[in-house]
Image (cartoon, rainbow, N blue to C red):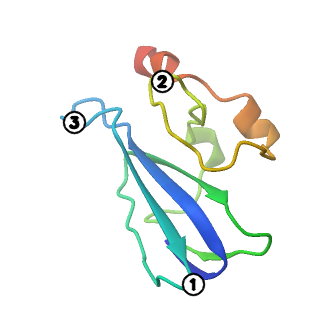
Amino acid sequence: MSVIKGKIFDVAVDLRKNSKTFGQYYQCTLSEKNSKSVYIPPGFAHGFQALENENYVVYSCTQYRNSTSEKVIQFNDKELNINWPLKKIIISKKDKNAMSLKQFIKK
């Protein structure tokens, strides 16, 4: 994952149930200025928040996207306690209907 124009706050959450770091997250800021990239392995949830009005994000996946196998975790889940930098947000319908981390664990 890289940003070639703009700036984003990027988060990856470990959802591998047998992992020592299950439920923990990694966060970073990716921008055209810092030229950072991040690799997000399979088994991790991934989300980002745009920090500028115009952002060009480049990413690839290990497999073709399969919407029926996607799991969506609430970006503001209290257990994850992610400190998103912007409080005023635009959120997709899919993300509005996301499950909590507790719900994910039960599945």
Element under disc 2: helix
Question: Disc 2 residue type?
Answer: Leu
- Quadrant of the rendered image containing residue 48: bottom right
Mark 3–mark 1 Cα distance, whole angstroms, equals 33 Å
In this view, the mark in front (1 or 2): 1
Compared to residue 105, the image places residue 97 above or below, namely below
On the image, the x and y values in percent for residue 34 come to: 47, 82
**Residue sitting at x 43%, y 50%:** 12
Residue 32: assigned label: 1
Can the viewer see residue 60 in this picture? no
In this view, the mark in front (3 or 1): 1
- Whether residues under marks 2 and 3 lie with C-beta atoms below 8 angstroms apart, the answer is no
In the picture of the structure, the residue carrying the numbered disc 2 is 101
Labels 2 and 3: the sequence-earlier one: 3
Question: Disc 1 residue type?
Answer: Glu
**Residue sitting at x 78%, y 75%:** 54
Mark 2–mark 3 Cα distance, whole angstroms, equals 15 Å
**Residue sitting at x 58%, y 45%:** 84
Labels 3 and 1: the sequence-earlier one: 3
Neighbours of disc 2 within 10 Å: few (<14), some (14-19), many (20+): some
Compared to residue 84, the image places residue 52 above or below, namely below
In the picture of the structure, the residue carrying the numbered disc 3 is 19
On the image, the x and y values in percent for residue 21 come to: 24, 37
Neighbours of disc 1 within 10 Å: few (<14), some (14-19), many (20+): some
Neighbours of disc 3 within 10 Å: few (<14), some (14-19), many (20+): few
Compared to residue 47, the image places residue 74 above or below, namely above
Q: Is residue 49 left or right of residue 16?
A: right
Front position in the image: 58 or 27: 27
- Whether residues under marks 3 and 1 lie with C-beta atoms below 8 angstroms apart, the answer is no
